[in-house]
Image (cartoon, rainbow, N blue to C red):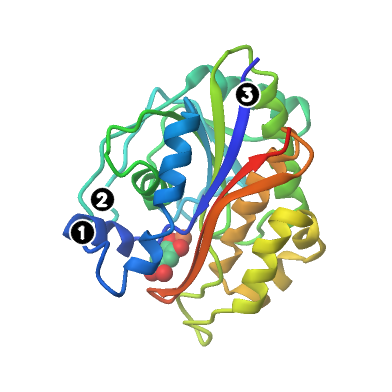
Amino acid sequence: MAKLIGGLGTSHIPAIGGAIHRGDQQTPYWKPFFDAFPPIHAWLCEKKPDVIVIFYNDHGLNFFLDKMPTFAVGTATQYVNSDEGWGIPSLEPLRGEVDLSWHIINTLIDKEFDVVTCQEMLVDHACSLPLKLFYPEGNYPVTVVPVCINTVQFPLPKASRCYALGKAVGQAIQSWGSDKKVAVLASGGLSHQLDGERAGFINKQFDLQFLQSLESNPEWATQFSVHELVEKTGTQGVELLMWLAMRGALTTAGSGVKKVSGSYHIPISNTATAVLALEPNN
Ligand code: DHB
Ligand code: FE
């Protein structure tokens, strides 16, 4: 059977793509963010996952407001990243892991998560940037399964539902008839609000408590309604639902987790950034 070897998390602010393109990683503004990655690169180099299941939210590239699935899973052989208007150079297409995609979909439907299946899927900065950050050399040595969670148009799925979705995805990974190593990845957050009266809103105290809960008490954030999460973290901060799904998946891989590395830095753009790698305790 396949093995779930760990969980990754990172913010996905599009400006990061511009910084990578310009080679700005060591400038004072960007250094605190990029400095979080080398220990995780070393961990990835040692553990060598073959496949990454990415929990992310589409921002209007593949799904627009006229058709908005709550949960969608890609089953494509490749996922093209289109220019979203940020001027980021387009990245090479991500390679799909089709067999795992269908195994995840079959498992999810069996567990009463009636997901949308996408045999074609464009992926935006929320999929491409994390891979660029975790594999800066390019030519990603991994295949992917994109799992899209709606955090863009209400109604959004509850925190407890996203955590349960993550658990079901974890069970699917562990029951996949393959000898491959799989990691799960959360893309988004942490607290941020890009528009409206509270634009620029950041809640450091909540973010730090949330990050700590992922290590020691992963169900902590499921006590909050989506509206409470928006109130506490901002309209886009609710992207932290991806981190709950990632952590839910890890519950199926061992008893508790060990932090490999992580960081929290304010701000990039108007956003509180976090980077994390967790390993299940076996
Ligand atoms: C920013 C953050 C996001 O999560 C996003 O999807 C787009 C922009 C930002 O902070 O600029
Ligand atoms: Fe976003």
According to the image, label 3 marks what residue? 3
Total count of labels? 3
Quadrant placement of the N terminus: top right
- Which quadrant, please, contains the C terminus? top right
Task: Give above or below for 201 relative to 80.
Answer: below
Helix, strand or loop at mark 3 = strand
Asked if residue 20 lies left or right of residue 276, the reply is: left
Circle 1 or circle 3, nearest the eye: 3
Residue type at tag 1: Gly
Q: Which residue is mark 2?
A: 83
Local crowd size for mark 2, using a 10 Å CA cut-off: few (<14), some (14–19), many (≥20): some
Which element is circle 1 on? loop
Direction from residue 55 to residue 208 in the image, left or right: right
Asked if the residue at tag 2 contacts the one at tag 3, i.e. Cβ–Cβ closer than 8 Å, the answer is no
Question: What is the CA distance from the residue labelled 1 to the residue labelled 2?
Answer: 7 Å
* Real-space CA distance between mark 3 and mark 2, rounded to the nearest whole angstrom: 34 Å
Residue farthest toward the right in the current orientation of the protein: 223
Query: Which disc number belongs to residue 87?
Result: 1
Spot the residue most to the left. 22
Q: Is any atom of residue 85 visible in this view? A: no
Residue type pointed to by label 3: Lys
Q: Are marks 1 and 2 in contact (CB under 8 Å)?
A: yes
The percent position of residue 252, horizontal first and vertical second, equals: 75, 34
